[in-house]
Amino acid sequence: MKKLILALAALAISVPAIAEEQFSMSTGFDYSTGKYGTATSTDILYIPVIGKYQSDSLTFKLTVPYLSVTGTGNVVPGVGPLPMSMGTPLAIGNPTNSTKSTTNSGVGDVTASVGYNVYDGETISFDLFGNVKFGTADVNKGLGTGKNDYSAQLDGYYSLSSTTLFATAGYKIYGAPAGVNLNSVPYGSIGISQKISNESSVGIMLDMLQSPSATGADQKDVTAYISQKFTPHFKVQVNAMKGFSNGSPDFGGGAMITGIF
């Protein structure tokens, strides 16, 4: 599943900082399925509510998600497969290492982000973001690690006429429960967005994330999306994703609606 990250909001391509205040609310869903290098599939439904406030060069964003995970309990959203023999709460979803699939759901990990536009040129812009993922997901249901994660990233944009090239380079520090070793890892993305009209745009992006766990694999997946603005204050975006490594879902898709106030 995408990092919130790198979450779904990452697909709503940011633009250089605005010179006035703006508040937006987004919601939708993201569904993904994959084996993540294991013998059975894990299905993840992710439904976020995202609030974003922009003022001059500053951006504040808060994401509160709902999660539903169907699987054997050894794949943790945002982390990947973890060994089930460590005697940690993460093993409760599958305490006997059986292949029986169960469904667990509840509030996911809340993420708060603060961004600053460090450079806003005529064609090039750079934003620096700091992110905190709070361990609010129920660890006993296998919905998270129960620990906070911290990350910092630099987003760059190069615009030429109706085409925008964008890239992200970041570094994430994982919090790990007792008995589990999670490494701090780099991540990144690169993509292109093309305006079809003043109301429509399409894009494609490649996401990459080094696995924080020795039992997992690096993530590599491609997402294509289309965004349609129906009014100056309302837009809809749909996306489809294909994974190209054991660390990624096999495939996924979703939709987001955004209201701008």
Image (cartoon, rainbow, N blue to C red):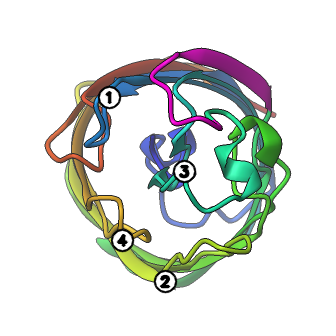
User: Which class describes the residues within 10 Å of circle 1: few (<14), some (14-19), or many (20+)?
Assistant: many
What's the residue at 30%, 38% (across, down)? 38
The span shown in magenta is 95-106
Indicate which label's residue lies in the foreground, 2 or 4. 4
Q: Element at badge 3?
A: loop
Residue 240 versus residue 204 in the image, above or below: above
Find the distance from the CA under tag 1 to the CA under tag 4: 19 Å
Q: Residue furthest bottom?
A: 118
Q: Element at badge 4?
A: loop
Q: Element at badge 1?
A: strand
Residue tagged by mark 2?
A: 184
Q: Position of residue 53 (x, y in %)?
A: 80, 54
Say which quarter of the image contains residue 56. Answer: bottom right
Residue 59 versus residue 181 in the image, above or below: above
Residue tagged by mark 3?
A: 84
Q: Earlier in the sequence, mark 2 or mark 4?
A: 2
Indicate which label's residue lies in the foreground, 3 or 2. 3
Amino acid under disc 2: Ser
Quadrant in the picture for the C terminus: top right
Residue tagged by mark 1?
A: 34
Find the distance from the CA under tag 3 to the CA under tag 2: 21 Å
User: Which class describes the residues within 10 Å of circle 2: few (<14), some (14-19), or many (20+)?
Assistant: some
